[in-house]
Amino acid sequence: MQRFFPVYFGKLSLYLHQMKRHLRKITFATIIFLSIPLLSQNNLIDSKSFIYPNKLEFGKVKSLFSVTLAKLPEDAVEEVSSNILAPLFNYDILYGLPMGFSGHGNFTTNWVTFHFALGPKWNYRYKKFSVSIGYDVAYVYGRLFNFGFDSEIKGWLNNPNLTFGIAFNKFTVSFKVDATLTTSLSQFNDDVEITTDKNKLSGIAFGAIIEQPLWKDNIISLSFNGNYTRLYYPAWAVFPTWDRFNFIPEILIGIVF
């Protein structure tokens, strides 16, 4: 299966590899860019941010569309390069509920794998500081039937999470920690079950998120995540068969609307 990854990402992988040497400069410039007032003069950035855990009015809806780039471990992509960044497309939605609660939904895909999540969050704010506690239940399904493969993955994951945020006049900074608990997850090859994981801690992730007005009322979200995991589900088709933890960094860029 490891040969699937180079074919799947093709030209995009080569392009991202060429961008690797400039990634640090781009990241640094982006942080500076997000840390200064831009075109918008909105002082209610905290109410418009998505990750910052502010209370959402009952019936109000927020959405976040984002793209995630992840640096996969060398064990998974050694045939090409350990510097490949794998793209992942995300859509998140929040729905305001009474008493500081909100409902969170997520859809994530890389065209081979599909991830659906749903769960509650509870938010509390004191002045410029805010915190939320959440719990998502997710279903993962993936199917690879090209390039001579007939493989499938499916199962359930639980994701308890905690977010702490600070609101400034022109931007917000949030820190988030997520755990991944595997309830059941099975992988098949030609209808033969080859791996099964049940009821175990599969990983933990830490994130730092900056949200800043880009133009008018449009908010950009920039997140830096560190995953310490033995189950990075978007890369199931190329992951090694042994069971051990890997460190996988991510950069996420999104627009709130």
Image: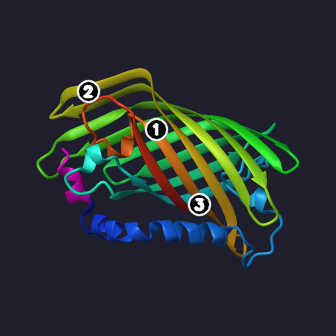
Q: What residue did someone put label 1 on? A: 228
Residue 137 lies in magenta, yes or no?
Answer: no
Q: State the separation of the CA atoms marked 3 and 1.
A: 20 Å
Going 38% across and 35% down the picture, which residue do you hit? 231
Q: Quadrant of the N terminus?
A: top left
Label whose residue precedes the other's in the sequence (3 or 2): 2
In depth, the one of 137 and 29 nearer the eye is 29
For marks 3 and 2, give the one nearer the viewer: 3
Task: Give the residue type at disc 3.
Answer: Leu
Q: Can you say whether 180 is above or below 18 in the image?
A: above
Going 27% across and 43% down the picture, which residue do you hit? 75
Tell me whether circle 2 and circle 1 mark residues in contact (CB < 8 Å): no
Q: Can you say whether 40 is above or below 161 in the image?
A: below
Secondary element at tag 3? strand
Task: Give the residue type at disc 1.
Answer: Tyr
Which picture quadrant has residue 30? bottom right
Task: Give the residue type at disc 2.
Answer: Thr
Going 50% across and 57% down the picture, which residue do you hit? 251
Q: State the separation of the CA atoms marked 2 and 1.
A: 21 Å
- Residue 208, given in percent of the width and then of the height, sits at 62, 51
Label whose residue precedes the other's in the sequence (3 or 1): 3
Residue 5 lies in magenta, yes or no?
Answer: yes
Q: Quadrant of the C terminus?
A: bottom right
For marks 2 and 1, give the one nearer the viewer: 1
Disc number for residue 195: 2
In depth, the one of 40 and 164 nearer the eye is 164
Going 64% across and 72% down the picture, which residue do you hit? 33
Label whose residue precedes the other's in the sequence (2 or 1): 2
Task: Report the span colored magenta.
Answer: 1-8
Disc number for residue 222: 3
**In the displayed structure image, the side of residue 57 where residue 246 appears, left or right:** left
